Amino acid sequence: MKRVTGIGGIFFKAKDAPALQAWYKRYLGIDVQPWGGAAFDWTDGEGKPVAGTTAWNIASEQSDQFAPSTASFMVNYRVDDLHALVEALRDEGCNVLEKVDDSEYGMFGWVIDPEGNKVELWQPPVVK
């Protein structure tokens, strides 16, 4: 079974999220949206879209999005078969959170790494 196939998103906290979002928008040209982040669509060498997007988001320092981790960041990894990977990680003794979310954006599961960082696993929805 293939495990991680890529990075689906990078999320981090800021003391002043709106100010930091504005900085990234102004100085790095990131199209920060009202939800606090941006979606980078994948393209080939000629700039033509290919299947995939990487999310980027700055959250408030008070956000509990990364709980139970106390880290100021979380990486979202793309996977092909979330349920099989979560089961394998549990069988291998990893600290897998019980909750699995299924939404229009795909399926999400979480594991805590040995240093206490919350790692998000994401199986994108099937595109028809």
Image (tube, rainbow, N blue to C red):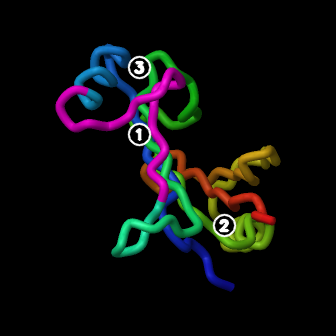
Q: Secondary structure at mark 3?
A: loop
Cα gap from disc 3 to disc 2, whole angstroms: 31 Å
Magenta stretch holds residue 120 = no
Q: Which quarter of the image is occupied by the N terminus?
A: bottom right
C-alpha separation, residue under disc 3 versus residue under disc 1 = 10 Å
Q: Is residue 82 above or below residue 111?
A: below
Return the x and y of residue 91 as percentages of the image width and height.
74, 72
* Between marks 3 and 2 in the image, the one whose residue lies nearer the viewer: 3
| Residue displayed at 71% across by 51% down | 108
Looking at the picture, which amino acid does disc 2 mark? Gly
Based on the displayed image, in which of its 4 quarters is residue 44 positioned? bottom left
**Residue designated by label 1:** 73
Sequence-wise, which precedes: disc 1 or disc 2?
A: 1
Q: Is residue 112 above or below residue 14?
A: below
Q: Residue at 41% across / 39% down in the picture? A: 73
Asked if disc 3 and disc 2 are in contact, CB closer than 8 Å, the reply is no
Q: Residues within 10 Å of mark 1 (few under 14, many from 20)?
A: some
Alpha-carbon span between mark 1 and mark 2: 24 Å
Mark positioned earlier in the residue sequence (3 or 2): 3
Q: Name the kind of residue labelled 1 in the image.
A: Phe
Q: Which residues are magenta?
A: 26-41
Dot label at residue 61: 3
> Residue sitting at 74 percent across and 53 percent down?
106
Residue type at mark 3? Glu
Q: Which mark is residue 12?
A: none
Residue 93 — which label? 2
Question: Which comes before the other along the chain, label 3 or label 1?
Answer: 3
Which image quarter holds the C terminus? bottom right
Q: Is residue 46 left or right of residue 57?
A: left
